[in-house]
Image (tube, rainbow, N blue to C red):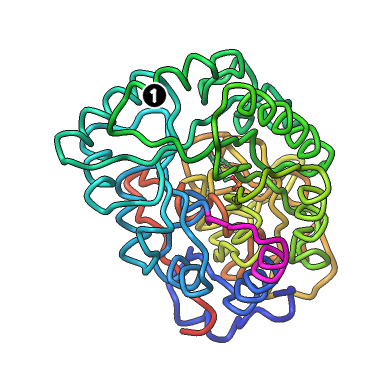
Amino acid sequence: MTKGTFPVESFKGLETPFYYYDVNLLKETLSIVKEITHKYGYIQHYAVKANANHRILQTIATAGFGADCVSGNEVKAAINAGFPASKVVFAGVGKTDKEINLALDYNIFCFNVESLPELEVMNELAEKKGKTASVAIRINPNVDAHTHEYITTGLNENKFGFSISFLPKVFEKIKTLKNIELIGIHFHIGSQITELDTFSELCEKLNDIQAICDKEGINIQHINLGGGLGIDYDDPNANPIPDFKGYYELINQKVSLRKGQILHTELGRSIVAQCGSLISRVTYVKEGESKKFVILDAGMTDLIRPALYQAYHKIENISSNLPVQQYDVVGPICESSDCFAKDYDLNETKRADFVALRSAGAYGEIMASQYNCRELPKAYLSDSL
Ligand code: LLP
């Protein structure tokens, strides 16, 4: 999707703001990931948290990927959209008994476990059902993802996973739990990682951990490296498809798998971010003392990333080809942080123009809220307009 290719005529009958997804781009992205992962024999579970829109999930399930879920409702959403339970993993530091029971009832592929108390509770709940829970141990490898601190997860100071030094103790514990079967190890160091070297460090840590497992006589079948591959927010037109080739090639070069081991990834953002845009109408153009404001009908309630992470989303006026002017682009919410960009070059803008906030397919629609009693944004896929 580039600026000239949005179906602006079809947008005219629709209430704004809404998310617009380019299905062709999503399908192209999926087929590239499918081709590369098949080549190396890797398995990709899509991280549902990035976007749980039913039609997006259906498209990803149809392409044959698995689902990485972090709540009981995500497990339900994935299964309702067509992901087979045998391809569903369930992660998260705070799974409740209700959520564990639900996932046990579905017979999901694997729980990614993050603490000893969680293992004990899961063992008890599985025993009551006469089932065995397959688990992967989430390891916190203490690798700096060099990304925003709110989306860094693999450092010792973060709440996620077990430190490497705990592993022998965890393996001992699992041997005593009759309704738990250890099938894998799991990592996730953070999100929007744009330096492939960071993943290289993770692969080296994994190789060290493999050596620990060998020493402990632990046979690990599944190695899950998590997600995190970043995308180009600056120029979605030039780079609509992230560097999957570089990412998987690096993993293939760096990781030494033992015989029969299967490598998994759980990419979310890189699969769905570039296919989505938040489409908004300009409500007013307001002249301030020293600047002009474009006031959109979309706000931080529809796309919270700029307010929460100071994230950049490219903004395009898709109704105007007039010379550019500088504006602050803001939403209608009663918070100063409800600002998408300051001093931003936008084609000269007037009331009712359509504006696209790009690269919003990941952590956009799903993070929308109803603050200020606003309606949640609607969503349309390009093949159904
Ligand atoms: N696996 C686990 C265990 C995760 O915690 C995450 C993301 C992923 C996979 C997928 O990571 P991805 O490939 O999408 O980077 N709301 C933030 C991002 C939070 C990511 C949380 N975990 C944002 O808008 O940037």
The three-letter amino acid code for the residue at tag 1 is Lys
- Tell me what residue is drawn at x 38 percent, y 58 percent: 86
User: Residue 342, position in %: x, y?
Assistant: 73, 43
The magenta segment is 34-46
Q: Report the residue marked by disc 1.
A: 175
- Position of 371 compared to 364: left or right? left
Task: Classify 53 as above or below 191.
Answer: below
Task: Classify 325 as above or below 175.
Answer: below
Q: Nearer the viewer, residue 377 or 95?
A: 95
- Position of 114 compared to 318: left or right? left
Tell me if residue 18 is in the magenta stretch.
no
Q: Quadrant of residue 352?
A: bottom right
Q: Quadrant of the N terminus?
A: bottom right
Residue at the extreme front: 217
- Tell me what residue is drawn at x 47 percent, y 43 percent: 333
Q: Find numbered disc 1 in the image and state the secondary structure of the residue it sits on.
A: helix
Task: Classify 320 as above or below 291.
Answer: below
